[in-house]
Amino acid sequence: MKRIWWIVIAVVALAGFWMVGQYNGLVTANEQVNGAWAQVDTQLQRRNDLIPNLVNTVKGYAQHEQEVFDNVSNARAKMAGAQSVSEKAEADAQLQGALGRLFMVVENYPNLKADANFRALQDELAGTENRIATSRRDYNGVVQTFNARIRQFPTNIVAGLLGFSSRDYFRASESAQTPPQVQF
């Protein structure tokens, strides 16, 4: 009889160790998702910080383009107020469209395109856009890994018991599929 109890205790201990290992793995994966999102958020904030300088530089040359500047400012404010991944993705699409229209306005001002400050800001913004794309790709990669892990058997049992749920991808909004239309 003692031998059966030792076997039961050993099985329960192994199951406990396995569950602790699964939990620790899920915590690590969840933190990787959080870290990747922090990188996306950092790059979005970096772009948000660059925009006022870019807009002010363009305003000096194109003072009558107030609607374009208002659209950029409104999109930037929406980005600053977005909380969830889907809200940030939607605000990001709106901001990209507004920036596209801003750069279309720039095409009408050859002196502005030659201005060193504008070129430096444009280069900085282009670099930031590349960082955002990389951060979004990395974030979506760790979300994919995390979501797959919490759906796989037997980890899905532990994930369900301990409250781990799938995370949202950073997806472009429907409006991002349509290029901005600018009319003068």
Image (cartoon, grey):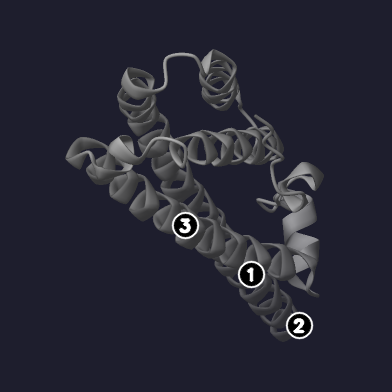
From mark 1 to mark 3, how far is it between C-alphas? 15 Å
From mark 3 to mark 2, how far is it between C-alphas? 54 Å
- The residue that label 1 is drawn on is 145
- The residue that label 3 is drawn on is 135
Nearer the observer, disc 1 or disc 3?
3
Among numbered discs 3 and 2, the one appearing first in the sequence: 2
x and y, in percent, of residue 183 in the image:
69, 33
Is residue 158 at least partly visible in the picture?
yes
**Picture residue at 35% right of the left edge, 41% below the top:** 110
Going by the numbered disc 3, the residue's amino acid type is Ser
Q: Are marks 1 and 2 in contact (CB under 8 Å)?
A: no
Nearer the observer, disc 1 or disc 2?
1
x and y, in percent, of residue 25 in the image:
55, 66
x and y, in percent, of residue 31 in the image:
49, 52
Nearer the observer, disc 3 or disc 2?
3
x and y, in percent, of residue 167 in the image:
70, 50
Q: Where residue 4 is drawn, which disc sits there?
A: 2
**Label 1 SS:** helix
Among numbered discs 1 and 3, the one appearing first in the sequence: 3
Going by the numbered disc 1, the residue's amino acid type is Thr
Quadrant where the image shows the C terminus:
top right
Going by the numbered disc 2, the residue's amino acid type is Ile
Quadrant where the image shows the N terminus:
bottom right
